[in-house]
Image (cartoon, rainbow, N blue to C red):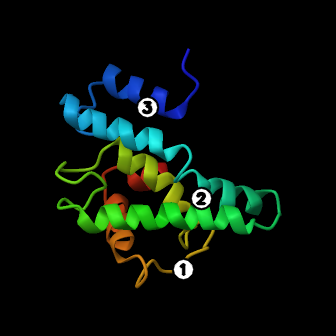
């Protein structure tokens, strides 16, 4: 039985043939998996540093905020060089990497924690990417 969210997502993608978001091409899938493994101690810092303290009414730590901001800057850098507008350069369309990243990054926006009122001008690539994610079919139904 899988209990890791990414193990479950990968299983569901394989089981349901969601090849558009979890491509069968081994090289592309390796890049998606690379992101999913990186996510655990990088982008997940956003939840540890901002969301969890808000839920438990505690102040975020300086170290946690620095780690979370470094992860956000890494996402901005990846999107800045991407030729597709999504996290994985050279891969057309949204993948599990984008979806997984969005649920961490998106919680900082005005609809949730409002930690960052506007991604512009410091993170313009994230702002554009976030709009692309929000325009995906089914977004409104799950948010």
Where residue 27 appears, as percent x and y from the top left, is: 20, 34
Q: Between 34 and 136, which is closer to the camera in this rendering?
A: 34
The residue lying at 21 percent from left, 28 percent from top is 26
Do the CB atoms of the residues marked 2 and 1 lie less than 8 Å apart?
Answer: no
The secondary element bearing badge 3 is classed as: helix
The residue lying at 41 percent from left, 76 percent from top is 123
Which one is closest to the eye, mark 2 or mark 1?
Answer: 2
Numbered label attached to residue 51: none
Q: Distance between the residues labelled 3 and 2?
A: 20 Å
Where residue 82 appears, as percent x and y from the top left, is: 23, 61
Which one is closest to the eye, mark 3 or mark 2?
Answer: 2
Do the CB atoms of the residues marked 3 and 1 lie less than 8 Å apart?
Answer: no
The secondary element bearing badge 1 is classed as: loop
Q: Distance between the residues labelled 2 and 1?
A: 15 Å
The residue lying at 46 percent from left, 44 percent from top is 38
Numbered label attached to residue 117: 1
- The residue that label 2 is drawn on is 46
- The residue that label 3 is drawn on is 9
Where residue 61 appears, as percent x and y from the top left, is: 75, 65
Q: Earlier in the sequence, mark 3 or mark 1?
A: 3
Q: Establish if 23 lies above or below 110.
A: above
Q: Establish if 24 lies above or below 78.
A: above
Label 1: how many residues lie within 10 Å, few (<14), some (14-19) or many (20+)? Answer: few
């Amino acid at each position: 039985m899988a209990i890791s969210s990414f193990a479950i997502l990968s299983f569901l993608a394989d089981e349901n043939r969601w090849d558009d978001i979890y491509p069968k091409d081994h090289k592309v899938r390796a890049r998606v998996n690379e992101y999913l493994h990186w996510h655990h101690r990088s982008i997940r810092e956003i939840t540890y540093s901002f969301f969890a303290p808000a839920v438990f009414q505690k102040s975020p730590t300086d170290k946690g905020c620095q780690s979370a901001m470094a992860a956000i800057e890494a996402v901005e850098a990846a999107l800045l060089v991407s030729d597709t507008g999504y996290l994985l350069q050279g891969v057309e369309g949204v993948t599990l990497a984008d979806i997984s990243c969005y649920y961490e990054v998106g919680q900082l926006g005005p609809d949730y924690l409002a930690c960052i009122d506007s991604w512009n001008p410091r993170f313009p690539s994230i702002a554009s990417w976030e709009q692309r994610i929000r325009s995906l079919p089914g977004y409104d139904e799950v948010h």
